[in-house]
Image: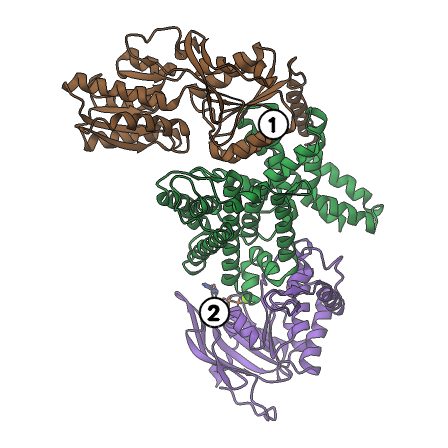
Amino acid sequence: MKGKLLVMLALVIGLAGLLGYAGDKGTVYYLAPNQFDEMQTTAAAWIQKLVEEVGYKCVVMVAGSEDVSLQINQMEDAITQHPAAIILAAANADAIVSSVEEARAAGIPVIVYDRVISGTYVDFTSVAGCKKMGIAAGHKIASLLKEKYGEVRGNILDIMGDPGDMYTVLIEEGFQEVMANYPEVKINTKIAYGWEATTGANLADDWLTVHPDTDLIFAHADHLAAAIASVLELKGYEKGEILLVSTAGMPMGLDLIREGWCQATVQQPVIAQARGVAMFLDKIVQHQCPKPGTYDVGGLEATLVYQDYGPELQIPGDVITIDNVDDPRWWGNQVGK
Amino acid sequence: MTENSGKSVAVLREGKLSIKGNRKAVLRWILDHMVWFILFFVLVVLSCSIRGFAQWGIFRNILYHAVFVGVLAIGEAICIISKEMDLSVESVAGLAAIMTAWLTGTGLDASGILLNGYLALLVVLAMGAIIGAFNAILVVNYKISSFIVTLAGYLMFRALALVVTNGHGVTRLRPEVVMVARTKLFSIPLMVVLLLFIYIAFYIFVTQTRFGQHIYLVGDSREASYNAGIRIGRVLFGVFMLSGMLAGLTGWLLAARTNGAAPNIGMGMLFEAMAAVVIGGVSLQGGVGNLAGVLAGAILLSTIATAVSLLGMPPFYMNVIRGGFIIIAVLLDALVQRIRPYLM
Amino acid sequence: MVERKDVTVLEPPVLRIEHIWKSFGKVQALKDVSFEVYKGDVLALLGDNGAGKSTLIKIISGNYRADKGKIYLNNQPVSFGSPAEARHAGIETVYQQSPVCLNASVTANFFIGRELCNGLPGIKFLKKRAMRQETEKAMADIGVHIPSVKEKVGLLSGGERQALILGRFFHWGGKIALLDEPFAALGVGEARKSLKLIQHMGQQMRLPIILITHNVEYAFEIATRFVVLRHGEMVGEGKIADVKVDDVVAMITGAIHVRDTN
Ligand SMILES: Nc1ncnc2c1ncn2[C@@H]1O[C@H](COP(=O)(O)OP(=O)(O)OP(=O)(O)O)[C@@H](O)[C@H]1O
Ligand SMILES: [Mg+2]
């Protein structure tokens, strides 16, 4: 009994020891909303790597699976440590506002990564523009349908991710905005709660059984698309017989394109977004305002604009198809290889 | 384990003559409040080993973060003391949070009613009580195991809320709700004061009132209680309704805390509440348990969460460590049960 | 019904049971059992294992319902749906295997269902100290020393538990008492003390008592009358003073069948 307790104790102290040192310039916390998929794990890994490269110690806190309440707790815990800055990918933008204000009141700069918080002023925002990704996806889908019928018409099965996640909500917004121009297109929107791949697969399976006239499936992330592709294969469809479009640009998404199951994915510039944060980190920590304009962020042309909620670095989301799938700039080609 | 505890018992037996009245009472008190000592020990270890841990801000956070599981665990604890089970608490809390947000929210998918926050509290408390009564009817009148009844509730109630809001969360609540999460009394969050107040009230309720005593007796032996004329059905109705109301309150507090309610709000809290209850020394055999221990259990869980966050460990470590503490707590409890007779 | 010319009957019987039948599936546990209990009676209910004694007690105490037959308490017909109702009517029962709350304190078990409270409307607060003192006194009266009445009953020995249940019975009394094997777990000393207390309650306080025991000597020591059951049937009834131990034992084992001779 006692022996085991001692082992536990040693473990705790040992782990604590890992934190025994801090970077020269202080600690930066990155608060991630989850670590489900390659996008989130890549984001966390690259933020940590790039932030440490510019001389800070970086600690990643993960809010379980999009647990809003846990993220507020983590925000409060981070504030007590007086870090150099807090980088935040909010599980819920409205819920976190008061904690953001609390941090800034304590003199800690808050940097928003990927998920915009518009309810309060923040020191820096680095986004792909999920809505823009939705718009890009919408245009790509329209052109795919046009290729098929000579005009933009047909039936689309639209599979969103968890509705609690702004990522999918914004993509949906952009997508619907584009599709509103095409009254001949019928869109059926389904939800894969919790971003569950199996849920997405089952939705597609059931839908195709009842509606074999479906032309295209738009999955809001590559891991959903991968599950849906195996449903298509199982049901005996040819590659491309039912069009498949996705977003994120995960390694598995790029593989689907190479295999021919997926026609396009709108990549989220995950690593470039992280690079953007690291580029401006020193300035933000010293409470300086970055200048508006265009910047080269890892080969992508990014624009810095001032929004109501502060400076925002917008990095374009590219449409990846079979023609450009091997471009080394895509984050999906940079990880795990 | 067995060998070791055997040894301690032997030592105690030899020492029996030398342990006199008062000192025995002190030792007994320590054993009965073991969880608090574990908690204290953990806090000391963490304070020594994590830089920036030993400060009022962190302790305040730990208490604050324990509020939700803490309140939920009271209901679960009295259910388990009465030898029933309430698996629906988490979903009822989720439903209450979403109802609160729906009634008082200004964001998308809200009702637009903009109900006063305190009226919304009354609504969710009443809703909790009704759900509790519903559970109790099935358990008492239809003799269905509470495990099954409340398992159904666990699946049903959160989903019910999402039906109302089309599966979306609701945000931006009326200010009087949000203020509850942001007000401090002498640098102590109002919710922490509320937590302590609720614990004290329920502690008095279960230890000092006849109804409270009956909860223990009914959980201990249904037959003895029946023979003694305790109206078991009525006790269980009270237990389930209280549990439902506490879940309703938890939901309201969560909505205030997150200024809204995401569809997954409070998800996983059932197991945290259960863990707090078990770590707190409440026995699943019924009739045994001390709410003070449950509070310590809830605080211990939030302590671990805070430490894991500060260390930047992946969140799944949190539950690895929490699971470990459940085992430690239960083993220690078994040890205490063996030593205790020697301290009579 | 057996005629009773031996007592001057001025008062009606406290308890009268008439033609009670009870079966559990195929097992006929009681067949047409009838007798009366008067003030001042200590009635020994005797019989072998499985004779139906406990079943009869549980019918009177409201745990079971009889298939047929009537029960009168002070000449009023009664029919109890639960032990609580029977107890409310003044029937105090000590069961053969009295369930206790093992994790609750001695005091809590002593006062179970009858807690002393401050009569606040709505919430009833326990008078813990008063209950403790009364429990201590009652346990001292029966001569059992318990380390602390605050201690949980699970830590008591079987005999101490039985003493607690008997003590509870002595404390509360009632109109009539049903004791099913109350000495089973008691040591010689405690059994003696309990016998004395039962005798005292029966004779001085004139509390009618039905006592089940396998110890015929104890029955002869304190009972005034006896009833013998065999396979659910009444095979003997009478005054203890009129019979010898051997005769009663013979009735129990089936060597004599009193009814046959009638
Ligand atoms: N709940 C029950 N269900 C089925 N059968 C029962 C039940 N209770 C008693 N019996 C049966 O009824 C008969 C009488 O049982 P009872 O307990 O009354 O005997 P008893 O005279 O008290 O015996 P003992 O001296 O062993 O306590 C037995 O055959 C028993 O098996
Ligand atoms: Mg019996």
Q: How many marks?
A: 2
Q: Position of residue A216 (x, y in %)?
A: 23, 23
Badge 1: chain ID: A
Chain represented in green: B
Chain A: give its colour: brown
Query: Horizontal placement of B27 versus A130: left or right?
Result: right
The structure residue drawn at horizontal position 68% and vertical position 60%, both measured from the top left corner, is C106
Amino acid type at mark 2: Tyr
Residue B290 seen in render: no
Q: Nearer the viewer, mark 1 or mark 2?
A: 1
Question: Which of the pair B114/C98 is nearer the observer?
Answer: B114
Query: Horizontal placement of A319 versus C216: left or right?
Result: left
Above-or-below relation of B62 to B243:
above
Task: Please name the residue that numbered disc 1 is placed on.
Answer: A78
Question: Which of the pair A95/C42 is nearer the observer?
Answer: A95
Chain C: give its colour: purple
Instruction: Say which quarter of the image contains residue B182.
Output: top right
Identify the element where label 2 is drawn: loop
Identify the element where label 1 is drawn: helix
Residue B158 seen in render: yes
Label 1 – label 2 distance at C-alpha: 65 Å
The structure residue drawn at horizontal position 61% and vertical position 54%, both measured from the top left corner, is B202
Amino acid type at mark 1: Ala
| Same chain, labels 1 and 2 | no
Task: Please name the residue that numbered disc 2 is placed on.
Answer: C64
Query: Horizontal placement of A199 versus B98: left or right?
Result: left
The structure residue drawn at horizontal position 61% and vertical position 93%, both measured from the top left corner, is C8
Q: Is the residue indicated by label 2 positioned so its CB lies within 8 Å of ligand 1?
A: yes
